Image (cartoon, rainbow, N blue to C red):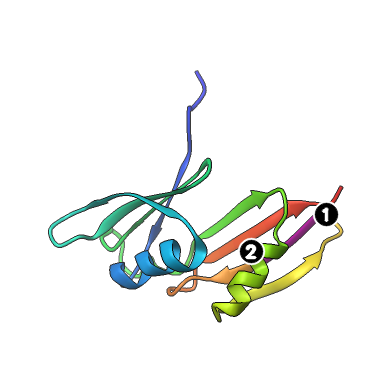
Amino acid sequence: MKPIASTTVLQVSNFSKSLHFYTEILGFELDFKYGEPECYAGLSWGSAYLHIGTFSPYKDNTGHGVIYLTFEEVDSIYKRLVKADVQFYSHIADQDYGMRDFSVKDPDGNQIGFGASIA
């Protein structure tokens, strides 16, 4: 049996700040919020699924995640994020592994990569 989907879950320290970053700055869509007060959300961007939450059974679990999103082109996304003044781990470049990519930091230091095939 094969899985039908995959969802990355990132631990965040400030739910509101992270939700704003992922939806208003990066461009994910909000699928749902959960908790009283709200502390967990499901997000999507095309067929990429991401959940963020402020609760975890593990202490100090923020800032250790990495996500890589693949697009047909990434230059327009890169330009938009430069204008939004996000922090970058790496700036856009053609890589020897066949991708044109870059990566940004979320508010907790998680790495979000954006890439497009150049092969």
Q: For the point 28% across and 58% down, which residue is it?
A: 56
Range of the magenta residues?
Answer: 97-102
- Name, please, the residue furthest toward the left: 36
What label sits on residue 77 in the rendered view?
A: 2
Task: Considering the whole magenta stretch, tell me its main secondary structure.
Answer: strand
**Secondary element type, mark 1:** loop
| Quadrant of res 63 | bottom left
Q: What residue is drawn where x is 48% and y is 70%?
A: 106
Position of 61 with respect to 91 (left or right) is: left
Q: Please name the residue shown 70% across and 56% down the image.
A: 115
Among the two numbered marks 2 and 1 on one chain, the one whose residue lies closer to the N terminus? 2
- Counting from the top left corner in percent of width and height, residue 1 is at 50, 18
Which amino acid, mark 1? Tyr
Horizontal side of residue 53 vs 7, given as left or right: left
| Residue sitting nearer the eye, 24 or 21 | 24
Q: Residues within 10 Å of mark 1 (few under 14, many from 20)?
A: few
| Image position of 46 (left or right of 29) | right
Q: Is residue 89 magenta?
A: no
Q: Residues within 10 Å of mark 2 (few under 14, many from 20)?
A: some
Identify the residue at horizontal 72%, vertical 62% (top origin): 101
Q: Which residue is mark 1?
A: 97
Image x and y of residue 38, in percent: 20, 60
Determine the CA span between mark 2 and mark 1.
Answer: 20 Å
Task: Please state which of residues 59 and 25 is positioned toward the viewer in this rendering.
Answer: 25
Secondary structure beneath dot 2 equals helix
Please state which of the two labelled residues, at mark 2 or mark 1, is closer to the viewer.
2
Q: Position of residue 73 (x, y in %)?
A: 72, 54
